[in-house]
Image: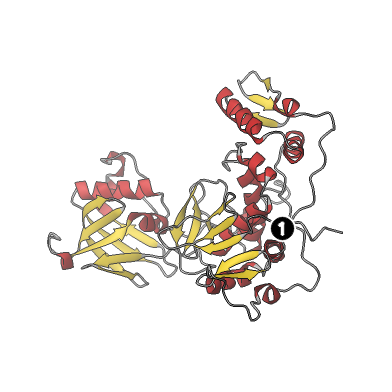
Amino acid sequence: MPDVSHPYDPLPDAPKDWTLKDALAATKSADGHFHCGQLEFESEKDYKSFTAAQIDLGGSKEQLDTLHYIETTGKPPRMEAMNPPPAGTTVDQLLDLGNQKPDKAGMYHLGSLQVSEKDYAKFAEVQKLACQNPEGLAALYHLEHSADTPPPTFRVTPDNERHDNYDPAKNRINFNPNSAVRDNSNGALLPPVVAVIHEEAHWGSRGAVLDTMSGIPAKPYGEMADRAVIEGAEGREMQRRGLTPRHAHEAQMIPVKGLESTTPSLTMQQDGKEREITPPFQQSGRVIGVKDGIATIAVRGDGTQPEHRMSFKVDQLATAMGQNVEQAEGLLKGAMSHKDTVTFQTTNDGRVVYQNPDQQQRIHDHPVGNIPFPDPMTPPPSAAQQVQAKTPAVEVGGR
């Protein structure tokens, strides 16, 4: 039976005579790569950085067990689901505050987990969604039944602190409920609720395992710690929701319209007032400025009067058009240099159609490079659609 007192079972023991020196011993292949068992480094610089980081960690048993697992299997530990909570555990039980009042620091205590009074409502809302997945329920249970010092804390971040992350030094999960995570490689969007499961899975690998994995590169996921989560808890939740899993760790935070949403949130500003854009929306104008992430168009005249111009956030437009920020900014700057009239039109799911016939005709002579002109963006195909698109009896497995 799984040990419900710990998120994961202990790793297999490394051989008794296997030392940190053994773990760091490398061979060099003809292509110049360095290999520690099945662990590969593309350059001597990467290998030396790895060895320095591992030496600094001190060679504890848990570190050696982690390195031995990675070097013999070629994959990170902690990719499996956390040990389940006791039978009959429900999210309502785990969220029940009883009669407690916040402590002097304004914190509620859910077992070992701390949540501030101001964050509790949003915390509870996202946990009820995350715990529809047994892995989410297991994560919440273990957060509330840890023996950590300092105890784990869940913090709902202000809008100006947009990145979700797990901070090991403070043992704190930071969560932005207003932003999804967009994979820069395949355009897949992780709803905010999936980002919660991602960070809670990082918490489950805290301590020496997380420290050890964090120093090991794992392309295209960044580090081995991120590969464990992206291919593990996060990937399974994306599949469960019928969403395309992301293929890389490099991503950006994208404002969306809800905890489970993959629809970009679009805003515009005019005459000093910002409002959300909802379909149907169409606006034409001449691009008169692209600076500091803001694109401004003149909607009347030359746009010299505040009420005659409208501003958009380039990152929002980029996501809604299905481009990265650099591509969208290139199109907008090109339109500005040629004094083109452009048209933005939203679709029912919050995507943007960018219309500029003149620019599309001369795109191969673009003033800032050969920028691909966007087709009307549709969400990435679901995991189920990707599987259906494969040739039967030819491809097996895959993401």
Residue 124, image x, y percentages: 59, 72
Tell me which residue sits at (64%, 59%) in the image: 151
* Quadrant of the rendered image containing residue 35: top right
In this picture the colour scheme is: secondary structure
- Whether residue 339 is visible to the viewer of this picture, yes or no, is yes
Per the image, label 1 sits on a secondary structure element best described as: loop
* Quadrant of the rendered image containing residue 120: bottom right
Residue 374, image x, y percentages: 38, 52
Nearest the camera: 143 or 219?
A: 143
Nearest the camera: 77 or 374?
A: 77
Q: Which amino acid does label 1 sit on?
A: Ala
Q: Tell me if mark 1 has few (under 14), some (14-19) or many (20+) residues whose alpha carbon lies within 10 angstroms of its own.
A: few
Q: Name the residue under label 1.
A: 147
Horizontal side of 19 relative to 274 (left or right) equals right
Question: With respect to residue 368, does 6 lie above or below?
Answer: below
Residue 308, image x, y percentages: 16, 66
- Find the residue positioned furthest to the top: 30
Number of dots carrying numbers: 1
- Find the residue positioned furthest to the bottom: 99
Question: With respect to residue 80, does 31 lie above or below?
Answer: above
* Quadrant of the rendered image containing residue 311: bottom left
Residue 154, image x, y percentages: 57, 62
Nearest the camera: 318 or 364?
A: 318
Q: In which quarter of the image is the N terminus?
A: bottom right
- Find the residue positioned furthest to the front: 104
Tell me which residue sits at (57%, 71%) in the image: 103
- Whether residue 399 is visible to the viewer of this picture, yes or no, is no
Horizontal side of 327 relative to 48 (left or right) equals left
